[in-house]
Structures are given as C-alpha cells and as structure tokens.
Image (cartoon, rainbow, N blue to C red):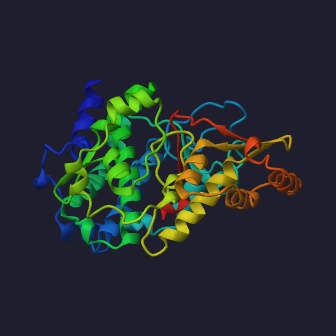
Amino acid sequence: MGTVAEAVHSCHSLPLSMLERARGATMNATSLAQHLGTSLETPNWLSEEMIKCISAIYIELADPPSIDHGLPLSPVSSSSVADSSPQHQSNIWSPETRRNPSFYSSMESAFSTEGSNELGGAYSTMIEVQRICRDGQSLKRVKNMLQQFRSFVLRLEEVHPEKMRHEEKIAFWINVHNSLVMHAFLVYGIPQNNLKRISLLLKAAYNVGGHTITVDMIQNSILGCRLPRPGQWLQALFFPKAKSKSRDTWKASALKHPEPRLYFALCSGSHSDPAVRMYTPKGVFQELEAAKDDYIHTNLRVHKEHKILLPKLVDSFAKKSGLCPAAFMEMIEHFMPHSAKKRLIQQHRHGRFWKKIEWTPHNHSFRYLLGKELLK
C-alpha cells in the first residue's frame, strides 16, 4: 500500500486539489510545445490533448476482465501491455511514437471490442475499459504520461472560457468534463458503491481561469445537462443546487442556449453512459449528431416486435429537446429493423406508440468506451 500511495502522490494527485501548487515542477509553455512538437495555441487544443492523454493512460492501465454473459475477453491483451518493452512503455506518448502508424494499428487490434454480443454499430470497434489497475508498478509505467497530463491540467488556469464562441465552449467543456471524471477515478480508485462514487466526484475539481470548477458545476451551471445519478435523495444531499453567486460566476462561460445532444457526449464512467470521444469546435455539431445516432443505434432493442427498449438517457434527451411523439418516432425509426418499422407506424396511427416504449434504467456499474480517434 505504501508503494501505491507514493506513486499516486508523486504522479498525479496534485491536479485534483486546488490548494496544492507546484509550478516549479511543471513545464513552461515553450518546453511543453517542444515536447509535443506543436504550439499551445487555443483552449480547445488543450482540452483535446487532455482527453487523448487521459484515454491513453486508461488503455495502459486497463485490467483484463474474465469472460461473462457472452462477452469476449477484455480488449486489453496481455501481449499489448504486460509484455510491452520498457522503452515502449516510457515513450508511448512521445511525438515519435504517436506519429508511427504501426503504433495505432497495434493498439486498435489489441483493444478492439469488435465481436461483442453487447456492443453494436460504431461501438463495436471502440476500446472497452472495465477496470483499471492502480498498483505501484502500473502507475510507475505511465509516470511520464501522468506528468504530461498534469502539465495540461495546470495550463487550464490560463484559459478564459468566457471569450470563446458557442461551438468552442461546447467542445472545450465536454473534453474537460470527461477528463476530470476519468482523472478522479484514476486518483481515488473506482468505488463499487454508488453513494461512494458520488462522494468521489465531489472531490474532483480543476482550476479553470482562476476559478475552481467541479463536475456538477460543468453539468449544471455551464452546460445545463445533468447526467443520471442514483437516487433523488442522494442528488439533493450531495449535489445541492448551485448558489446564485456560483451561477453568476460562470454565466459568461455558460452556453447561451441548451444543447440536448450533450446527453450523448458527457460520460461519468457508468455502463449506460455514451462513449468518450474527442470533440472539436470545427465539427462539434456533426460530432454530437454522430454520438446521438451511434448511442441510439447501439442501445435500441425490439422485443418480439411488441416492445421497443430504449435507455432512460434517450428519454431525457427527448424531454430536453421537446420532441413530440411524431418527431420522436421519426428519430428512432431509422435504427429499427424493417419489419418493426411497419408495426411502429401502425401503432403511431392508433395512438399506441408511447405504450410500446419501455425505458431501461441507467446502469451505474463502471465502464468506459473510448473512441479510436483518441489514439490519433
């Protein structure tokens, strides 16, 4: 335990606490740019590098699960991580390694979940992480990557989100939100108890532009998209509504109008959450639309052509969007088998459409799906 605690403290515990500062141990902007072979130009670039870096760390620390309920072995193969050479382990995030095409092809073949009985569509080729290993040896293996991620986090202090355009804010805050949650699990571990998991996320905070920002503030005060949490009383107890002063502080950084498709982009590490992807200001609306389509396509089930099973997250999206039954039916019919489409139209004509939908509860067990674009 002493080795683990030492590794956690030395490698990556610092960025989650706004009371601890170690600027002297952080690369300056020039050396950081030289290390990555690029220049630190925009807040969006910074958030993109953060989500790529933390995802690469998760892949390195992924713990292979056993076969269960027809699922294949973990996407993490022993030959790809455990047997990798020390040189590969220490330089996995270097510019030379990242520019090597063979690196990406080997990572994709090692971590793909293709063939899973559970995942479908675009999700079938994503990287699945069901557990992460946080022992001292594993953390030392990714020490350089953790230090790199720390430098990114500390650079958030210089960001001014209030100066961003709408699409820049959306992409930036999605990437930062997902990075922050992943970082919290990396530092504190993954509690199996839902209550402890909520408590864990309360500890996670970044300094953005000189202000302490939490997961709940990003969801509520900035993006206006609160993810499902277990138990209403737990939400009231541990996630009280933000005070007016807090809302005023982030008013300039918040979205000017709601974006319901954020439900398919934000991830808190739950099994029913959408996959983690990298979002860019240039293509954020197309990326959000693709995320929505992929999520519905993967999770929609038709039970004997009588019941349409959909995740509760889709219900939240429909309500936030204000979709009428006709618009909702039009949205999901694209993802249904041809034989079921005819029955769906008949049910809608007779006013029985909503009675045929069954909302499946949100599964809060831990899992991450990572888009392959995060490796590039």
Q: Can I make out residue 279 in this image?
A: yes
Q: Residue at x 39, y 48 (%)?
A: 86
Residue 185 is situated, as x and y percent measured from the top left of the image, at 38, 38
Q: Residue furthest left?
A: 24
| Residue 272 or residue 39, whichever sits in front | 272
Residue 353 image position (x, y, % from top left): 77, 48
Q: Nearer the viewer, residue 302 or 355?
A: 355
Q: Is residue 232 above or below residue 139?
A: above
Q: Residue 44 appears in which quarter of the rendering?
A: bottom left
State the image coordinates of residue 213 (x, y, percent, origin top left): 25, 50
> Is residue 142 visible from the viewing direction of this image?
no
Q: Is residue 348 above or below residue 194?
A: below
Q: Is residue 342 left or right of residue 230?
A: right
Which corner quadrant holds the N terminus? top left
- Residue drawn at (44%, 61%), measured in percent from left and top? 258
**Measuring 57% from the left and 41% from the top, which residue is drawn there?**
272
- Residue 357 in the image: x percent, y percent? 72, 43
